[in-house]
Amino acid sequence: MEMLVTKFSKGKYRNEGELFSEPISTENVKLMGEMIALQALRTVKKYDMKIADKLYIGLIKDLHHMREIDYTVSDGYDCAQTAMCFLYQFIGRTVHEIYGKDKKGKDITIKCACYREIDRFIDGLRNRPNRHKQVEYIDFTDYKALPMDPVNCFEHEQADFSKADALMDAMHLTDKEKEMLEYYMSGWKRSEIAKILCVTKSCMDYRKLRIRYKYRTYIGEF
């Protein structure tokens, strides 16, 4: 199975570490913005399911379908465009270079500053009863669950999916069945997969039955 960055770069990058090790350029700024937006939304949605989760699911859906004719992108892609516009001013530099200092006097990287720019954008979408209230943004510098910045930040998590891919090929799955199975194997919830694939839950149940049938037919019993 492919990581999203591998899929959308058509195999150019094995992981996000390889992507972010390169200087920002006109060729990669779009992909960088999309991946940073996904990372930021994954973080923010732990605190704000109402807004961030909807944007996150919309962005995932956009990345898979935006090249289709007459497809209309969701509000989630605005987060990616916010990141792209922010990064574009740093063409020729890497995201790990120092952007400046925050209010506490700590050095922050360009990538961290981009996370915060997205967080401010998301905050603007919230309906707050008191718009003059002091806004507290997520401190992406110290947040432990945030994806790491080192060059090969995902290298130690790389798993060998060759056996799983071989099994999926042997089962003769359709593209739609394979896509749904990959989401399940990546830990996505049933409701999230249904939204991303634009299918009903009954349709998903049918595909699961077909996958199980093909497994028993071509591989054997569980």
Image: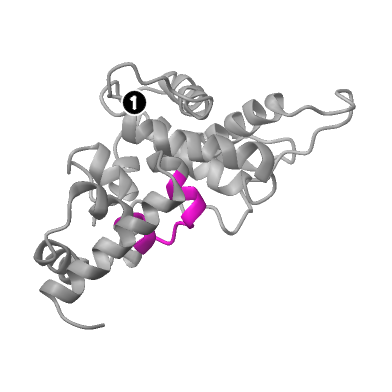
Magenta-drawn stretch, dominant element (helix, strand or loop)? helix
* Residue 167 rendering spot, x and y as whole percentages: 15, 69
* Residue 88 rendering spot, x and y as whole percentages: 41, 20
Query: Which residue position is annotated with label 1?
Result: 66
Amino acid of disc 1: Met
Q: Residue at x 53, y 25 (%)?
A: 75
Question: Does residue 212 lie above or below 60 as drawn?
Answer: below
Residue in front for this viewpoint, 117 or 67: 67
Residue at the limit of the structure toward the bottom, as seen here: 221
Left or right, 18 with respect to 170, comes to: right
Residue in front for this viewpoint, 104 or 45: 45
Q: On the rendered image, what quadrant is the C terminus found in?
A: bottom left
Give the magenta-colored segment's residue range: 182-194
Q: Is residue 18 visible?
A: yes
* Residue 83 part of the magenta segment: no
Q: Residue at x 29, y 29 (%)?
A: 28
Q: Residue at x 47, y 42 (%)?
A: 195
* Residue 25 rendering spot, x and y as whole percentages: 30, 25
